[in-house]
Image: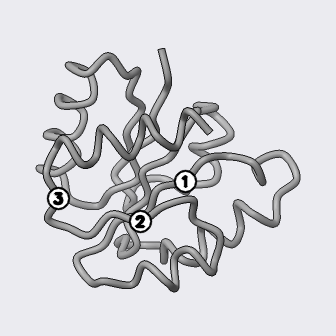
Amino acid sequence: MAKVLLAEDDETMLTLLTTLLSIEGFEVASLLSNETDVLAAIRRERPDIVLLDVHLAQQNGLDVIQAIRRDPELANLRVVMTSGMNIADACIQKGANDFLLKPYMPDDLIGMLKKNLAG
């Protein structure tokens, strides 16, 4: 079972995603970005993949993805970034494996996570 870390600052979205991913058979670790440092949570939870919101309350997702890619321990971690703005190119340039534009359909999210976990 793959473990997904959700880095999201919208509590409702976090609850919905946790429920959806659990139903789909994923192990879910979630954090409200205004409570926790994303890198510290990644080190603690050791996820297989991260669903990272670009616009977090206390941190910028683009800064977080760059920090992940600079860290030798985390550099190969799979990261899918999400945003309500179509900034896929910027996310991919900074090191994201994939990008999903909000709002998205649950099937699109599940498919993208499975595709990225498969390599």
Mark 2 residue type? Phe
In the image, is 39 to the left or to the right of 98?
A: right
In the rendered image of this protein, does residue 81 appear above or below residue 110? below
Label 2 residue SS:
strand
Label 1 residue SS:
strand
Q: Which mark is residue 62?
A: none
- Per the image, the residue denoted by label 3 is 104
> Looking at the image, is mark 1 or mark 3 earlier in the sequence?
1
How is the structure coloured here?
Answer: one colour
Mark 3 residue type? Tyr
**Circles 1 and 3: CB atoms closer than 8 Å:** no
Mark 1 neighbour density, 10 Å: few (under 14) some (14–19) many (20 or more): many
In the image, is 6 to the left or to the right of 43?
A: left
Kindly identify the residue that appears in the image at 35 percent across and 72 percent down: 57
Residue 34 percent across, percent down from the top left: 37, 62
Say which of marks 1 and 2 sits in front. Answer: 2
Number of on-image labels: 3
- State the image quarter where residue 25 is shown: top left
> Looking at the image, is mark 3 or mark 2 earlier in the sequence?
2
- Per the image, the residue denoted by label 1 is 79
Mark 3 and mark 2: Cα distance apart in space: 11 Å
- Per the image, the residue denoted by label 2 is 99
Q: Return the residue nearer the eye: 51 or 8.
A: 51
Q: Return the residue nearer the eye: 108 or 81.
A: 108
Q: Classify the position of the C terminus by image quarter.
A: top right
Kindly identify the residue that appears in the image at 40 percent across and 73 percent down: 54
Residue 67 percent across, percent down from the top left: 71, 68
In the image, is 21 to the left or to the right of 74?
A: left
In the current view of this chain or complex, which residue is farthest to the right?
72
Residue 26 percent across, percent down from the top left: 37, 22
In the rendered image of this protein, does residue 69 appear above or below residue 47? below
Kindly identify the residue that appears in the image at 18 percent across and 31 percent down: 20
